[in-house]
Amino acid sequence: MNCHICHKPLTGKYYFDSWDNKICESHINNDAVLCSSCNGFTKKDIVLPDDRVLCNVCMSIAIKPGDSIEAVKRSVINALSKVGFDDLRIEDISIEIVSAQKLAEIRKSPVNLQNKGLTLSTTTTSFGFLSGKNQQFKHTIYMLTHLTKIEFAGTLAHEMLHAWQTQNGIEMSPKLTEGLCNMGAYLMYNTLASSLTRIYLKSLHESPDPIYGDGFREVYAQFEELGWSELIRKVREKKLV
Ligand SMILES: [Zn+2]
Ligand SMILES: [Zn+2]
C-alpha cells in the first residue's frame, strides 16, 4: 500500500479520504489538501485565484472560459426535457463562464464559493404582458469557472430551472425555488456516468443550508412520492407547497 501523495509505502498511522486514497500522517496540515471538487487528497499543485485547489483529475475536466460547452449544454437540455421540462426556451438563454470575483460582483455580495451559478432574467416586452400574452424573457446564466464537466452540468441544470420557473411565471418560496432547481442537479448526477456523481449527490442530500439543503430535501420527498411528471404538473399548477 503506497501513499497517494509521496507514493512511498505506508508505514504506521495513515489517513484516507472518501475515495479510499491513503496518505502518510506527515502530509496532514502540511502538503496535502482535499480537492475542492472531488474531496480527494491532493498536493497543493493547482491553486486557483479564488483559493480553490483542484486535483489533476478534476483539473483535466474543468470547464474554463472559452471552452466549448455545446455538448454539456445539450445533455442538460435533453435530460430536463425528457423528464417533463420540455418547454425550456433555450434560444432565450445565454451562458457565460466567469470568475468567483465576477460572480460576486454580479450578485453584489462577497465572494462565496458555494455560489456556482447565477441566472439574471430580463423582460423584453411589457407589451406582451399587458395584452395577456406570455411575457418574454432573456436569461443570462453566469457559471463559476473551473467546475468539472459533471458539476458544471448539475449547476447548469439548476440555473436552467430558474429560467424555466421565471418563464412560466412560477413564484415559490426561496426554499421551494432552490429545492426544485437542485432537482435539476440531482437529475444530471443520476444521468451522467462518472465516479464524481456520488460525491455531488451526497452534498446535495446532506447540505446543511436552510434554503438549498432543506429546500432540496422537501422537494425530493415529494418527487419520491410523485415522480417527475406529477411533480412538474404540481409546479406548473402552482400547487407545490
Ligand atoms: Zn479532484
Ligand atoms: Zn438557485
Image (tube, rainbow, N blue to C red):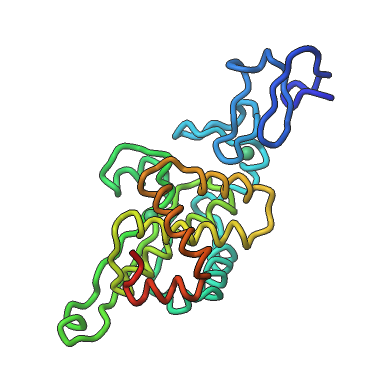
Q: Residue at x 65, y 29 (%)?
A: 42
Rendering coords of residue 135 (x, y %) = 25, 78
In the rendered image, the quadrant that contains the C terminus is bottom left
In the rendered image, the quadrant that contains the N terminus is top right
The relative height of residue 130 versus residue 159 in the rendered view (above or below) is below
The relative height of residue 136 versus residue 196 in the rendered view (above or below) is below
Q: Residue at x 81, y 14 (%)?
A: 11
Q: Residue at x 37, y 63 (%)?
A: 162
The relative height of residue 50 versus residue 195 in the rendered view (above or below) is above
Q: Along the horizontal axis of the image, is 45 left or right of 240?
A: right
Rendering coords of residue 193 (x, y %) = 68, 58
Rendering coords of residue 169 (x, y %) = 28, 73
- Split into quadrants, the picture shows ligand 2 in the one at bottom left
Q: Residue at x 28, y 41 (%)?
A: 109
Residue lying farthest front? 225
Question: Hey, which quadrant is residue 12 in on the image?
Answer: top right
Q: In this view of the protein, which residue sits in the foreground, 116 or 182?
A: 182
Q: How many marks?
A: 0
The relative height of residue 35 versus residue 94 in the rendered view (above or below) is above
Q: Along the horizontal axis of the image, is 196 left or right of 112?
A: right
Q: Along the horizontal axis of the image, is 218 left or right of 171?
A: right
